[in-house]
Image: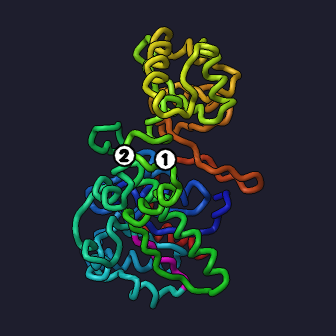
Amino acid sequence: MTGPLAGIRVVELAGLAPAPFGCMILSDLGAEVVQVDRPGGSGAPPSPLRRGRRTVTLDLKTEAGVADLLRLAARADVLVEGFRPGVAERLGFGPGVCEKINTRLVYARMTGWGQDGPLAPRAGHDIDYIALAGALEPIGRAGERPHAPLNLIGDFAGGGMLLAVGVLAALLERERSGCGQVVDAAMVDGSALLTAFLHGSGLFPRPRGENLLDGGAPFYDTYATADGGFVAVGALEPAFYAALLDGLGLAGAGLPPQHDRDGWPVLRARFEAVFSTRTRAEWVSVFAGTDACVAPVLSPGEAPAHPHHRARNTFVEVGGVPQPAPAPRFARTPPDAPSAPVEAAVDEILAGWLL
C-alpha cells in the first residue's frame, strides 16, 4: 500500500452509505481496510463505496464470529461500526472489550443521532438528520417546501466525511498519548457543523429561496437552455457579473443594478429569455475563457468526460464502473489507484498483519 495512511490497519463492519464512504476515504488515502461482511452479503453497493477493501464474512451473532473479529481488532489501528447505540456491546465487541485487547485502537462509531441523547435509539435517515440540524429548511425555491439535496449532506458530508476526519484526528493524537479512543460520529452533528456559515453570516436574512446564495439572486442560479439542458451562473463579484452581461449581450441594456433586490425579477426574466435562445454547448462556447462564472450543469454520467476532469484524472474506472478518483492529492505520498474489493480469510489477513 502507498499513500499518506500506508501502514494503518482498519477493520470496518459492513453497513450502509456513511460508514462505507468514510472507510473508502481511508482506503483511498492508503490505509489497509478489511471489511467484515455479514453472511448473505453487505448492504453497501458494490462500487465505489467498497473499493480498495479485502472482505471477510463473519457471523457476529455467533461466538466464533465475534472471536475472529476480536482477533482482527487486536492487531488493527481502527475499528469502524455503524450499529445503533448498545448493539456492539450486546454482541460482545463494544469499546470496553476492544480496549482490553488493544489499548491503541481507535473505535469509530457512525450513527444518525449519536451515542446519547433522547433520539439516540430511534431510527432515522439522512433527511431526518439534516431536518433536525437546520440544514434542510434553507434549501429550496421561494414559496415552496424544503427540497432534499439527495442524501449528500447527512450520509456523506456530515456522516462519512466527518467519520474520516474524526479517525484521522484520533490517530494523530495517539502519536502523542499512545492510546486509542472512541470517536462518536453522528450525522446530525456533522450536518449541523456544515451549517456553520449560515449562523451569524448575515447572508440569509430572508426566507428560503430569497437570499444571495440560495437561488434568490438571478446571478447565482441555474437557467434552462434551448436543448433542455441547464447552465449554472455564479457571477457574484462585479467584474464577473460584467463578464456575464457581456456574454449574454446585455451590457448597456439599461438593466437594474446587480444588487438592487427590487430589480431581481427583471434581471431573472431577461436572463431566462436569453439563455433559452442557445443550447448548453453553445453557451459553454460563448463563455469559454471568461470569468463570467458560467458552467454547464452535467449529470453524474456526463461529468467524467469533461475536458477538465480528463486533464486532471478526476474520475477513474474501477471494475468497469466510472467513479470519482481519490482526493485530495499528495505530492510526495500519492496513494495507489483504487481497486475492486477482494475476498479473503481472517487467518490470511492476520498472517500479513504479523509483519
Above-or-below relation of 191 to 143: below
Amino acid on which the number 2 mark rests in the picture: Pro
Query: Could you tell me which quadrant the N terminus lies in?
Result: bottom right
Mark 2: secondary structure: loop
Mark 1: secondary structure: loop
Residue 56 on image: x %, y %: 40, 63
Residues under numbered marks 2 and 1 in contact, where contact means CB atoms less than 8 Å apart: no
Amino acid on which the number 1 mark rests in the picture: Ala
Q: Nearer the viewer, residue 279 or 331?
A: 279
Magenta residues (range): 104-109
Q: According to the image, label 1 marks what residue?
A: 340
State which quadrant residue 83 falls in: bottom left
Is-magenta flag for residue 105? yes
Q: According to the image, label 2 marks what residue?
A: 207
State which quadrant residue 149 falls in: top left
Disc 2 or disc 1, which is closer to the eye?
2
